[in-house]
């Protein structure tokens, strides 16, 4: 019953996404597939709350106005960096990684972190949705909708580094690369 209560609080797109995870073509043939139990509490076993909070903040500031897929894609790209040896091996380490270019303090890995603006999450609904997406991403890391992306940018910019990477997909205003 607890799972269903939380399920109904999710937006329609996120509900559809979860349903697509749970339903598999084999189910139409009368077979039921096993899948991880869905625990929509805001905790994830084995993951520190501070790490979930870092992922929540990154989703909120990078993709708060995106739909559920856009938010999840940002979460997955962040988690892909954690697994990539070129980046720090913790979520907070990735999110708060400093400037990419020496002596350019405005050039952080994620622009919101060093843009000089407040990092206070003011919209409670968007913050809660970001937390739920962070939880889903951590519960289902194998469901990477970015196809291994470690980088992304908004579709209204054309960074030079994008030419050196392989485009994987686009969700909302973000274009993803590996």
Image (tube, rainbow, N blue to C red):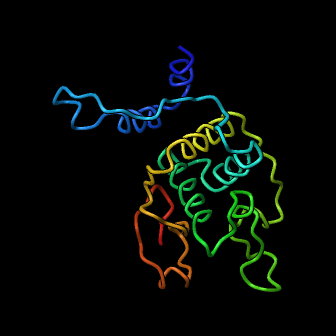
Query: Residue 5 location in percent, x, y?
Result: 55, 18
Q: Which residue sits at x=60%, y=52%?
A: 63
Q: Which residue sits at x=50%, y=79%?
A: 162
Number of labels in the image equals 0
Query: Residue 49 location in percent, x, y?
Result: 75, 42
- Which of 57/41 is in front? 41
Query: Residue 77 location in percent, x, y?
Result: 55, 60
- Which of 15/147 is in front? 147
- As displayed, is residue 45 above or below residue 171? above
Query: Residue 88 location in percent, x, y?
Result: 69, 68
- Which of 125/96 is in front? 96
Q: Is residue 108 left or right of residue 147?
A: right
| Residue occupying the far top of the picture | 1
Q: Which residue sits at x=81%, y=47%?
A: 120
- As displayed, is residue 86 above or below residue 172? below
Which quadrant of the view contains residue 118? Answer: bottom right
Q: Is residue 150 left or right of residue 41?
A: left
- As displayed, is residue 40 above or below residue 133? above
Q: Which residue sits at x=41%, y=39%?
A: 17
């Amino acid at each position: 019953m607890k799972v269903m209560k939380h399920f109904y609080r999710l937006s329609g797109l996120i509900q559809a996404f979860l349903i697509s995870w749970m339903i598999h073509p084999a189910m139409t043939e009368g077979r039921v597939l096993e899948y991880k139990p869905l625990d929509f509490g805001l905790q994830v076993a084995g993951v520190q709350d501070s790490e979930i909070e870092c992922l929540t903040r990154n989703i909120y500031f990078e993709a708060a106005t995106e739909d559920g897929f856009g938010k999840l894609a940002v979460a997955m790209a962040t988690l892909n960096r954690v697994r990539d040896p070129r980046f720090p091996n913790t979520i907070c380490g990735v999110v708060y990684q400093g400037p990419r270019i020496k002596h350019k303090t405005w050039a952080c890995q994620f622009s919101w972190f060093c843009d000089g603006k407040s990092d206070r999450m003011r919209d409670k609904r968007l913050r809660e949705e970001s937390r739920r997406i962070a939880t889903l991403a951590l519960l289902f890391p194998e469901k990477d909708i970015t196809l291994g992306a470690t980088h992304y940018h908004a579709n209204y910019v054309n960074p030079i580094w994008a030419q050196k990477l392989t485009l994987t997909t686009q969700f909302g205003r973000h274009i993803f690369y590996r």
